[in-house]
Image (spheres, rainbow, N blue to C red):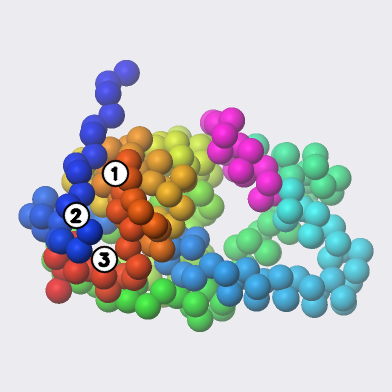
Amino acid sequence: MSALPTARPLPSTGSAIDRAALRALVLDVDGTMYVQRPVRVGMALRLARATLASPAAGLRSWRVLHAYRAAQETLRLEGSRAAGEDQLRRAVDRSGVGLDEARACVARWMHEEPGPLLRRHRRAGLLELLGAARAAGVRIGVFSDYPAERKLAALGVDGLVDAVASAHDAGIGAFKPSPAGLLAVARALGVSPADCVYVGDRPEVDGAAAAAAGMPAFIVGGRGGGNGWDPIDSFPALARRLGLP
């Protein structure tokens, strides 16, 4: 197996990246493109109302979703070659809910219901960053641990993205911090990982995946920095770091 490329050292905080070397911008979705806490609160309220209306079904949904999220974090540590199906099977085993009901629960509460909340809590400057990148000839990719197309449409950015992949896709099958998804997006964009910049929100997941893939990275809301990633507090600040107008 050939060695992974080494990420270029990022400049010190506040300075700009060499614009000429930047060919692609790859972004995470959850917690990166939108502010996650108010979305989670809003979804908890929606699920609570559904539980009041149908207590037995609602409680089963709570169990499935809790088990589903817990399974993802376990699989991050263990590794998986079929991340989406492994996650669902573990959620079924832990929750005691049938497979079809669990699958429908995840589809509704993880992918369908959040849409209106995502647009409301989209991070300021996201559209402007993506638009400026495309105008400058920088290609845009997205990699998420979850299928992202529906969320990108809800956020209003689907028309600005050149390549989308998730850990659930055949040929990837691994959650971050595995670099498999980031490398797949770089291939789809036709660029070297070292000519990309990755943007995420979790240093231990996104920062580690980018380092393993050989991509310099920024962590929205991160503190300190290290191992190939720098913190950034907003998308307008990121645009300045990237030398985008």
Q: Residue at x 90, y 69 (%)?
A: 55
235 to 80, vertically: above or below = below
User: Left or right of 19: which side holds 183?
Assistant: right
Q: Residue at x 66, y 50 (%)?
A: 69
Residue 160 x %, y %: 31, 67
Which residue bears the numbered disc 2?
Answer: 12
Which residue bears the numbered disc 1?
Answer: 228
Bounds of the magenta segment: 68-84
User: Left or right of 27: which side holds 154?
Assistant: right
Q: Is residue 42 in view? A: yes
**Magenta span: chief secondary structure:** helix
Label 2: how many Cα within 10 Å (few below 14, some 14–19, many 20+)? few
Quadrant of residue 26 within the rendered picture: bottom left
The secondary element bearing badge 3 is classed as helix
For marks 3 and 1 on the same chain, the one whose residue lies earlier in the sequence: 1
Which residue bears the numbered disc 3?
Answer: 238
For marks 1 and 2 on the same chain, the one whose residue lies earlier in the sequence: 2
Q: Is residue 127 in view? A: no
Type of residue at label 1?
Gly
Type of residue at label 2?
Ser
Q: Is residue 105 magenta?
A: no
Query: Mark 3 and mark 1: span between their CA atoms?
Result: 16 Å
4 to 111, vertically: above or below = above
Q: Residue at x 29, y 44 (%)?
A: 228
Type of residue at label 3?
Leu
